[in-house]
């Protein structure tokens, strides 16, 4: 049989105050009001003033103040507007909470509160468009599919990920990459995505086909624009589109492959593709996606703060790494020649990762060089043919 509970009324609190002032015990007061002794004890304890003691009107006001009046994002409209605005830009609840804390210097809201708010809106209104504020746009947890076969045996010169140097796992040394294809429902459409493990920066190249020779050519062109110290290793899954990986050895890059049915071993690129699905769902038709919009999507990803980067953006971290490597690999003197060399290199690299906006070092270059900060379209930014 279920229990029912009723809050103490103002009249009951007046009686509690009268009996307490007359010296009655808690159990005597509880018996007189037909209440539990714990109810009387709790009300006397938490509603008693430090100097004036227990006052019925004050206790009633405290009770009303403690009553639940909706979730925080329902009560605070400015905070709700700020959270939904960032969620609409593709940020996850954790990124929103972390960035607000970083900007204001204190914890503003928990990411769990944001998740609960979104799920509560779905249940309360039965409006499933709220799920689009979530990173994966899901209202229910997904179910893993069954495993199929693996083409690992068809890849020549395949080296298992188990043979990759152990120091690569700590993500401290830049130049370690992961690559995969982002597939779409229309046959033959794919985007070659390349992810740097230290900065989490993402490159995207639209492909006309996923033939292994063409994929290897695009990867070689992409990595050739980077300094040698940023060309260390690259990790693939066992798709046959990466069967020509040996072409990257000419750039002094080592190639490794995940174990069959273990895409989690290159979790960085898998996570990046999952985040990009917010901008480009699987049903997206790449033939109707303008190049300018495609660049903006890549730039939006690279300019979104990440918890693993202390809520800095991948563009900020990669620009620092790239600027440091450019300076360390360029001839330090004379100074004017050094700046010119760095500017030319920047003009080649910036278009490659799809116009990463607001790079901190790009502004420094533009103030010391005549090189334009607005790059012209390049082959890697446009649809490959």
Image (cartoon, rainbow, N blue to C red):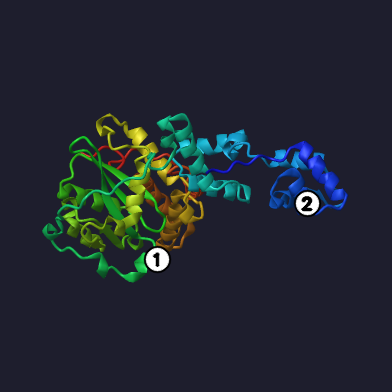
Could you tell me which residue is drawn at 32 percent across and 37 percent down?
A: 281
Could you tell me which residue is drawn at 20 percent across and 48 percent down?
A: 215
Residue named by callout 2: 28
The foreground one among 49 and 296 is: 49
Residue 259 in picture, x, y percent from top left = 23, 61
Could you tell me which residue is drawn at 80 percent across and 54 percent down?
A: 25
Q: Is residue 339 visible?
A: no
Could you tell me which residue is drawn at 48 percent across and 58 percent down?
A: 335
> The C terminus lies in which quarter of the figure?
top left
Label 2 neighbour load within 10 Å: few <14, some 14-19, many 20+: some
Please tell me which of labels 2 and 1 falls first in the chain. 2
Which type of secondary structure does the marked residue at label 2 adopt? helix
- How far is disc 2 from disc 1 in space, using C-alphas? 66 Å
Residue 115 in picture, x, y percent from top left = 48, 43
The foreground one among 100 and 194 is: 100
Which type of secondary structure does the marked residue at label 1 adopt? helix
Q: Is residue 106 above or below residue 294?
A: below
Residue 88 in picture, x, y percent from top left = 46, 35
Circles 2 and 1 in contact, beta carbons < 8 Å: no
Residue named by callout 1: 170
């Amino acid at each position: 049989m279920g229990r029912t509970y009723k809050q103490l009324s103002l009249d009951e609190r007046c009686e509690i105050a009268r009996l307490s002032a007359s010296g009655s015990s808690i159990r005597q007061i509880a018996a007189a009001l037909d209440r539990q002794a714990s109810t009387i004890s709790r009300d006397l304890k938490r509603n008693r003033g430090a100097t004036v003691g227990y006052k019925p009107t004050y206790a009633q006001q405290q009770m009303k103040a403690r009553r639940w009046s909706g979730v925080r994002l329902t009560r605070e409209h400015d905070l709700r507007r700020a959270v939904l605005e960032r969620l609409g830009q593709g940020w996850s609840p954790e990124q929103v909470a972390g960035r607000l804390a970083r900007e204001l210097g204190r914890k503003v809201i928990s990411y769990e509160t944001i998740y609960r708010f979104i799920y509560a809106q779905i249940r309360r209104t039965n409006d499933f468009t709220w799920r689009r504020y979530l990173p994966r746009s899901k209202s229910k947890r997904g179910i893993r599919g069954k495993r199929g076969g693996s083409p690992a045996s068809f890849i020549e010169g395949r080296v298992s990920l188990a043979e990759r140097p152990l120091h690569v796992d700590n993500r401290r040394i830049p130049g370690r990459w992961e690559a995969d294809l982002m597939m779409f429902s229309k046959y033959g459409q794919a985007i070659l995505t390349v992810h740097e493990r230290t900065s989490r920066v993402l490159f995207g190249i639209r492909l006309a086909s996923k033939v292994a020779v063409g994929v290897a050519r695009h990867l070689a062109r992409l990595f050739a624009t980077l300094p040698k110290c940023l060309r260390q290793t690259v990790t693939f899954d066992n798709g046959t589109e990466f069967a020509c990986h040996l072409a990257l050895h000419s750039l002094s890059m080592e190639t490794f492959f995940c174990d069959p049915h273990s895409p989690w071993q290159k979790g960085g690129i898998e996570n990046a593709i999952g985040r990009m699905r917010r901008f480009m769902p699987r049903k997206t038709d790449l033939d109707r996606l303008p190049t300018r919009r495609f660049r903006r999507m890549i730039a939006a990803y690279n300019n979104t703060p990440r918890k693993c980067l202390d809520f800095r953006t991948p563009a900020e971290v990669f620009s620092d790494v790239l600027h440091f490597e450019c300076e360390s690999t360029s001839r330090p003197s004379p100074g004017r020649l050094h700046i010119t060399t760095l500017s030319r290199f920047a003009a080649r690299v910036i278009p490659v990762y799809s116009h990463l906006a607001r790079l901190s070092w790009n502004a420094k270059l533009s103030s010391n060089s005549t090189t334009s900060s607005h790059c012209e379209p390049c082959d890697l930014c446009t649809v490959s043919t």
